[in-house]
Amino acid sequence: MLGLRRFIPWIDHERDVSVREILLKPKGKLSLRTAPRGGQLAKNVKETDHGTIPFGSTSSASLLIHGFAVNEEGATKSYQAFCGMLDDAQLKDTYWVYWPGDMYPDFRSKASYHPVIERAQATAETLAEFIAGRLAKSSIQEPFKLRIFAHSMGCRVALETLKQLLPITGASAPGRRLEIEHVSLMAAAVRRVHLQKDIHPDDSLREVIIEAQTAQIYRSYWDFVLAAVFRLGQAFSTTKTKPPRSLLSAVGRWGIHGKKRPVGTRKTGPTATKDTITELGHTQYWSDPFLIESHKNNMRGVERIMKPNSVSMRRVNGRTMTPVNGPAIRDF
């Protein structure tokens, strides 16, 4: 079954759910859904389970954003697996984001990839408007520190959301200023062209990575969802930039710079972008202990810049990983 998950993207996680995971309570939930399965994109974000402290009223927050063809129940299971390994303090700073990445309540969701790209962009607009609105009304002077941990198409939602929030990251922002403390992209269903230099501004999401204090890309050559389904789904997607075909592949499989460049840390200005190769299948990121341990460090706000030439090896499903650390590269 472990091997099949790499080739068949629709196999759910077959795992025991602990009592702690069932009883997990995040800081809050932000829903943009109109139905648990399928349904339309909600006009406004619905905030639930936040107690007496609404979003934007604390010093920081961590958003978890699921990917394509995931219903509300599936997203909850992924978030429970992720949060089950967090410390209580980190859990209390976490918000679970639900968006209608499943176009239909049945199997047709798996075959509706291209329309979901537009829905992801629309989701980002609504989510960004919600966050900006909350911070504009806040009387707190301290900057609001935001961390995002996203998977698959959720990475597109995350980057598009943060791109629209860039105007409130400056010192002249109205209301409370936003700091993008960390961005983690797991199996990112985002074309490499969107993170390149010298492309049309409408296509570029690179500014988000530059603005973030730290950024992390987790990817896998074994991700056959991105190898096949992503490329097929993107076939009808257009960009104002006319890139070579190599830049139309997914960041979650080939990284930003592709196979010719070594993995490791790429640093530009204040940003350290860490590129880590795993051997995970597309659906395994939320519950991988190694990744979550790395996420826990990022949730503490610790800048994780690797030393040049340091090497870390581990075994996944019986295979030895590619070294996850490499020489620092200064031309991201």
Image (cartoon, grey):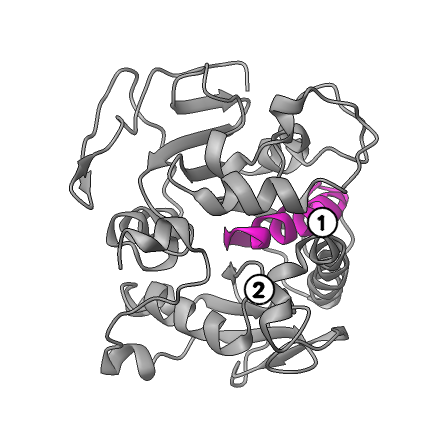
Q: Is residue 132 above or below residue 222?
A: below
Front residue of 91/114: it is 114
Expressed as whole percent of the image width and height from the top left, the position of residue 232 reads 64, 43
Q: Given the image, on which type of amino acid does mark 1 rest? A: Leu
Residue 291 lies in the magenta stretch: no
How many residues crowd mark 2 within 10 Å: few (<14), some (14–19), many (20+)?
many
Above or below, 313 relative to 32: above
Callout in the foreground (1, 2): 2
Q: Quadrant of the N terminus?
A: bottom left
Question: Residue 9: x and y, percent?
Answer: 45, 56
Label annotation for residue 194: none
Number of residues whose C-alpha sits closer than 10 Å to that of mark 1, classed few (under 14), some (14–19) or many (20 or more): many
**Residue in the foreground of this view, choosing between 229 and 135:** 229
Instruction: Decide whether residue 162 is among the magenta residues.
Output: yes
Q: Which image quarter holds the C terminus?
A: top right
Residue 83 versus residue 52 in the image, above or below: above
Q: Which mark is residue 69?
A: 2
Task: State left or right for residue 82 relative to residue 117.
Answer: left
Residue 156 location in percent, x, y? 63, 48
In this rendering, would 223 be left or right of 31?
left
Instruction: Answer with the quarter of the image where residue 110 lies.
Output: bottom right
Q: Is residue 127 visible?
A: yes
Label 1 sits on residue: 165
How many tags in the picture? 2
Q: Residue at x 37, y 39 (%)?
A: 222
Residue at (19%, 37%) from the top-left corner? Answer: 319
- Kind of element beneath mark 2: loop
Q: Residue at x 64, y 68 (%)?
A: 108
- Can residue 92 be seen here? The reply is no
In the image, which residues are magenta?
Answer: 144-172
